[in-house]
Image: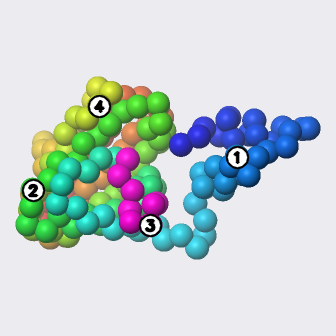
Amino acid sequence: MTTKTNLKSFFETGDKPTQGQFYEWMDSYWHKDESSQIKINSTTEITNQTTAANGYSQNGKNVLIDNGNTDINYKINLSSDTEENFLITGIKLGTAAITFTVGSGSPVLTKIDNTLAVNGTKGSRFMISRVGNTNEFLIFINNL
């Protein structure tokens, strides 16, 4: 993801943005025709950078994760392209557990509800929040 500062630099007085820069600018924003909800079907590990089949990012979305009857890890990665103010809400559609784990870049996972596993029934919910550009991610889980 390109920062707002970099995007603005493409369009300074006298600049002639390239087609690629224009596309990058357009792809950096939510469009009113895009759904606020995405679905990820996976029986393998996923990360906070995993996109939906249509290529949409998880950030700012309600994420439906269908892992069927296979336990999966959801790795939280921290890198230079990790979005600031990352926030998702999620619903588990599968019957198996989704466990949040530390990925690359040494993020800090703070469990708010004394667990890092969504292991309740279908419909159990979670939220992942990163405020600003810190290395801390808050994990809220509501197992049903």
Name which residue lies at 68% across and 49% down: 20
As helix, strand or loop, the secondary structure at mark 2 comes to loop
Kindly identify which residue carries mark 4. 104
Residue 71, disc: 2
Residue farthest to the front, as pictured:
19
Q: Residue 21 carries which label?
A: 1
Tell me which amino acid carries mark 3: Asn
Label 1 Cα neighbours within 10 Å, binned few <14 / some 14-19 / many ≥20: some
Whichever of callouts 2 and 4 sits on the residue coming sooner in the sequence is 2
Answer whether labels 3 and 2 touch (C-beta < 8 Å).
no
Between the C-alphas of marks 2 and 4, the distance is: 20 Å
Q: Is the magenta stretch mostly helix, strand or loop?
A: loop
* Mark-to-mark CA distance, 1 and 2: 40 Å
> Which picture quadrant has residue 95?
bottom left
Residue 64 appears left or right of 23 = left
- The amino acid beneath tag 1 is Gln
Q: Which of marks 3 and 4 is nearer the N terminus?
A: 3
Q: Which mark is residue 54?
A: 3
> Considering only order in the chain, which callout, 4 or 1, is on the residue closer to the N terminus?
1
Tell which of 56 and 129 is nearer to you. 56
| Discs 1/4, front | 1
Relative to 24, 73 lies left or right: left
SS of the residue under disc 1: helix
Query: Which range of residues does the magenta coloring cover?
Result: 49-56
Numbered disc in front, either 3 or 2: 3
- Looking at the rendered structure, which numbered label has been put on residue 90? none
**From this viewpoint, which residue is outermost toward the top?**
106
Q: Residue furthest right?
A: 14
From mark 1 to mark 4, how far is it between C-alphas?
A: 28 Å
